[in-house]
Amino acid sequence: MNLGEVFAEPLVDLGDSDPAFAGIVTPRSALGAVKVGVTAQFLDHAEEYHRRYHDVDYWRFLIGNALEKAAITGEVGTVIDIGSGSGNSVIPLSERFPRARIVATDISPQLLAILRQFLRQRPEMLQRISLVCVDASAAAYRSGVADLVVGAAILHHILEPARVLASCREALKRGGWAIFFEPFEAGNAIVKLVYERIIAQASQDERDGDAMRFLARMVADYQLRQRPKSDPVFRDLDDKWMFTRSYFERIRAEQGWSELISYPLNVCATPLRNQAEVHLKLGAELPPSALPTWAWEVIDATDAGFSNDLRREWATEGAILLRR
């Protein structure tokens, strides 16, 4: 793949300075640059991050639904994947578009190296997929080079997501779609309130347990993310944003996107229970039984208080589709 057709600045192979990253390229201007706002979770601890969060089947399902919503049914020529990590979205995209060239980008060369190892076992994919280590906020794409841009849970990790969206718009051909999957504030605000209620009702012994301590950390994290985004604390947080539909509506108007589609993910009868189980599993590697039965009763009673319409309106996570 000729990446000079995609990027507006020269790229160099990281393998020239570190053989561990051979085959992963980066903009020349990024060599030696400090990675601002990215934490060790994605760099030094990339293997652990991959172990916890690699789930191609889940992302295959989400991406398939989004492509259907955007009515993308045929082949595409070029796909830029933002925040590719170890391949959660890259692999489904390469399967869905078997003739497309895919530019997999991430700020972490360590995560891209994990993806590279997978691709080396599948040469039919490797020849179509390029690995580019680049800060999404600083990526300089040529205008109108991509048919599709995808970001699987990336914008909330970035200090200035509006800059990323603007560069994605620049990269897209007219009529092309940018698809993102992100946490939303409305649903997470309810999760936070439920966790606070459970902690308040817990005995001291229960509060000293692993599950309650984890809920307390989640509440503290929610409180941090509600601060003004100018606060320097966000440079040291893994998760920086919880979004609203209003935010993306402003982005659409300010940047000149022609269309915005937004919808909640995982609409079901028990959204809070499902979210709590995912939090315990991914955040603390704990089973549901780590929380006492009465805590699940609080969660289930709250779930039961929502109408079906409200469950479709509020979201802990949502898809955002923007059309150039």
Image (tube, rainbow, N blue to C red):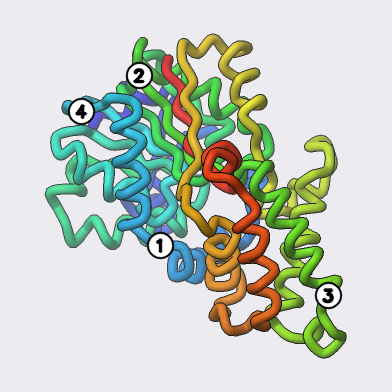
How many C-alpha atoms fall within 10 Å of the one at disc 3: few (<14), some, or many (≥20)?
few
Q: Distance between the residues labelled 4 and 2?
A: 13 Å
For the question of whether residue 87 can be seen, the reply is yes
- Tell me, for residue 201, which label it has, or none: 3
The amino acid pointed to by label 1 is His
Q: How far apart are marks 2 and 3 (CA)?
A: 50 Å
- Report the quarter where the N terminus lies: top left
Q: Distance between the residues labelled 4 and 1?
A: 26 Å
- Residue position for label 4: 73
The image quarter in which residue 277 lies? bottom right
SS for callout 3: helix
Q: Distance between the residues labelled 4 and 3?
A: 51 Å
Above or below, 268 relative to 206: above
**Number of numbered callouts drawn:** 4
The amino acid pointed to by label 4 is Thr
SS for callout 4: loop
SS for callout 2: strand
SS for callout 1: loop
How many C-alpha atoms fall within 10 Å of the one at disc 2: few (<14), some, or many (≥20)?
many
- In front of the other: 127 or 67: 67
- Report the quarter where the C terminus lies: top left
Whether residue 89 sits left or right of residue 186 in the image: it is left
Above or below, 320 relative to 123: above
Labels 4, 1: front one: 4
| Image point (23%, 43%), residue name | 94
- Residue position for label 2: 176
The amino acid pointed to by label 3 is Gln
Which of the two discs, 4 and 3, labels the residue nearer the N terminus?
A: 4
| Tag 4 near tag 2, CB within 8 Å | no
